[in-house]
Amino acid sequence: MTMTKAFNQSDLEAYLDEALPPEQMARIEKALRADPRLIGQVSAIHSRRSAGVHSLGDIWRGGRLSCPTREQLGSLLLGVLPDDAADYVRFHLEVVGCRYCRANLEDLKGQQAEGRETVQKRRRRYFQSSAGYLRH
Amino acid sequence: MSNSHQSDKLLIGRIRDGDADAWNDLISQYEGRLLAYVQSRLRDRAAAEDVVQETFIGFLTSLPNYDQRRPLEGYLFSIAAHKLTDFLRRRGRRPTIPLAPEGTSSSGWQPDAGARPASSIVRSGERRGLEAAAVTDALAEQIDHWRGRGQWEKLKCIELLFVRGMPNKNVAAALNVSEQTVANHKYEFLAKLRTAVRKQNLSEEVFPELYQQQ
């Protein structure tokens, strides 16, 4: 199998959106450095999008149409999601590898672990660095 | 409209009025998930925090153009993705991807026979938005339908086919079903979506995947 064939169209579209799991993003980046044909492939997708040709995967992923809610992810962590729904959410996280839902899950898990003071300090920093852009 | 979407709309309204407490609330609500998203790629806490900081500044500077029909979380993630991409380019980890010159396609991905090259169907931003919205609605309706009826296998199957781009054979193996079952789900899904697209009077060439070989 050549490098160019190692990634399918959807992988490359998701790569452009920073939507793949980190390990897959890294694999594609490595391949892009080694294979100019792959650059051509990604470039063609980029051009197509600029011309307005939609892919169903783009629309589905961009609209996060099958993502569970944050409440459902919380219920999964608490073990109170019904079995069939929990099975789907795990599939979405692990097999589809939804990066946004993984981030939400990590955040929910980390809320208990991180100290309140650390979080407050970080939030103050975000606020102070950005509040000047608020409309006055 | 969901409760969270409604409360986000109210929050944004207050932020647009310059309410600093509302801005603080938004930061508190979203920074954790944004940080997790960015850090999963960078493995560098300080750099990840800088990217999230740029994301919040980017949100405020783009606020006049923000369409409130778009979910806030998705919008914030998309800004974070752009900021992260810029950061990775600056670090030399992520190559710059040029637009392909007109008429070239080294990908072999241009729509199959019968479809026109992208350059011939350049359309206005407004038109593109309408097309995407129509398909989004049709997809969302279909996904709700599967969920409501507990048809999880169909949802998983179509998600692997169209979001992950897996071939039928691999989807069958991943879900432990026959290739014929995958083909049947795909056929049914495409037929329903084609009907929805036709109802909206959208051009076939906009969504070549709907007319591909089964």
Image (tube, helix red, strand yellow):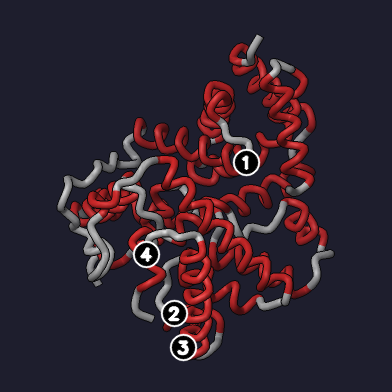
Residue on which disc 3 sits: B179
The structure residue drawn at horizontal position 40% and vertical position 76%, both measured from the top left corner, is: B167
Outermost residue to the top: A136
Q: Are marks 4 and 2 in contact (CB under 8 Å)?
A: no
x, y percentage for residue B8? Answer: 72, 36
Which of the two residues, B85 or B116, is positioned nearer the viewer here?
B116
Residue highlighted by disc 1: B69
Which chain letter matches label 1? B
* Labels 3, 4: one chain: yes
Under circle 1, the secondary element is loop
Say which chain tag 3 marks. B
Q: Nearer the viewer, mark 1 or mark 4?
A: 4
On the image, the x and y values in percent for residue A110 come to: 72, 45
- Mark 1 vs mark 2, foreground winner is 1
Q: Earlier in the sequence, mark 1 or mark 3?
A: 1
Q: CA distance from mark 2 to mark 3?
A: 9 Å
